Amino acid sequence: MLPKPPAREPGLGFLYIPPYRIVGTSIAGEATSLMVPELDVCFDLGVCPRPMLPAKFACISHGHMDHIGGLAYYCSQRYFQGMGPGNIICPKAIAPAIRKMMDGYIDLERQKTPYNLIELEPEETHEIKNNTFVRGFALEHTVPTYGYSVYERRSKLKDEFVGLPQEKLTELKGQGTEITRWIEIPLVAYVFDTIPTPALVREDVRKAPVILAETTFFEPDDRARAKVGMHLHVADLVEWLRFTECQAMVIGHVSRRTNLAVAKSNLVKALGRDKAAKVHFLMDGKANKERFERQLMDAGEHPLQVKGGGKFGAGPFRSKPREGGPGMSGGMGGGMGGAAGGAGGRFSGPARDPDPRP
């Protein structure tokens, strides 16, 4: 009698929340890795699937293995593929331990993989794209942990000069008068592994159009477990959603014990259908596949015609979504979806050059 084949691993989760693609995997205690390709950033690297490699920056929330286990591989593969050094952003408190971990691979591999370690104090920022910054802020977990907010910095005319003719503005500027001010526009917030804390309702989280969030426990009897492990319970999520202004909240770090159909049903009861429709479970592949196919059809594309993607395969990894692409789909099937299975098939990354390392 032939042996059974190994269990199939779920594919990567995928969501298109215009203008961002959210790609990754997140299962409580196993691995969390999320990427936003349009921002050149990934958040945590419990594992490092191939689609994560093009991200120029990796923002590490904390040092638990399910959030950091793929970090060295990310740096090594970026160098091997000729993509340049990986840039690791992390809490300053854990930077020495990360450096020590990376140094250990020098002895193991008998070679040195280049990388850049960017240590952030709470509330410090780092530019990741032109006028686009990431800010680290403290969360409350069993070890030092950061959340991250990504925001765009824009110049705006000061209120007192609004309505003045261009000639007058030019004159004032020539006299040395500062006529503009800088404003911060939240884009994406990442809040994983924490108990309820004031950080959840800080302005750059509360007003972010997209929030990537942890909710580990969904059963009523799990409140005590959530408190001990310092994770969010669905009751905390429900309360949090009452204060957010996000277009979409993507939920990860869900326990394997959770029945997603029951979890979605309970959220609808607690929040109402309209508000629950903006909650998406990253690893709910079936619902999210259907949602993305509706988005394609709304944009005049047929799911089977997506370049390089088959029915759902690598299609979501086209180089860039079209301008003015598909919007948010309505209805519970799409609104409550997360996605696994989106990244199967090939990724249109660079060819594998000969190993440049000595």
Image (cartoon, rainbow, N blue to C red):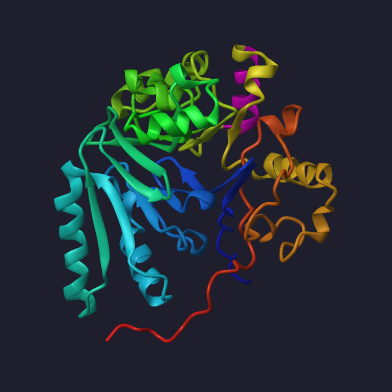
Q: Looking at the image, is 341 positioned above or below residue 254?
A: below
What x and y, as percent, mark residue 333? 74, 32
The N terminus lies in quadrant = bottom right
Whether residue 263 appears in magenta in the rendering, the answer is yes
Image: magenta residue range? 259-269
Whether residue 194 appears in magenta in the rendering, the answer is no
The C terminus lies in quadrant = bottom left
User: Camera-side residue: 91 or 208?
Assistant: 208
Quarter of image, res 82? bottom left
Residue at 48% across, 24% down: 207
What x and y, as percent, mark residue 202? 37, 21
Q: Looking at the image, is 64 positioned above or below residue 79?
A: above
Q: Looking at the image, is 178 positioned above or below residue 268?
A: below
Residue at 30% across, 83% down: 357
Residue at 64% across, 53% down: 342
Q: How many marks?
A: 0
What x and y, as percent, mark residue 264? 63, 26
Q: Does the magenta stretch mainly form a helix, a strand or a loop?
A: helix
User: Camera-side residue: 289 or 5?
Assistant: 289
User: Camera-side residue: 8 or 237?
Assistant: 237
Left or right: residue 332 versus residue 43 is right
Q: Is residue 66 visible?
A: no
Left or right: residue 301 versus residue 219 is right
Q: Is residue 64 visible?
A: yes
Residue at 83% across, 52% down: 301
What x and y, as percent, mark residue 40? 46, 54
Quarter of image, res 87? bottom left
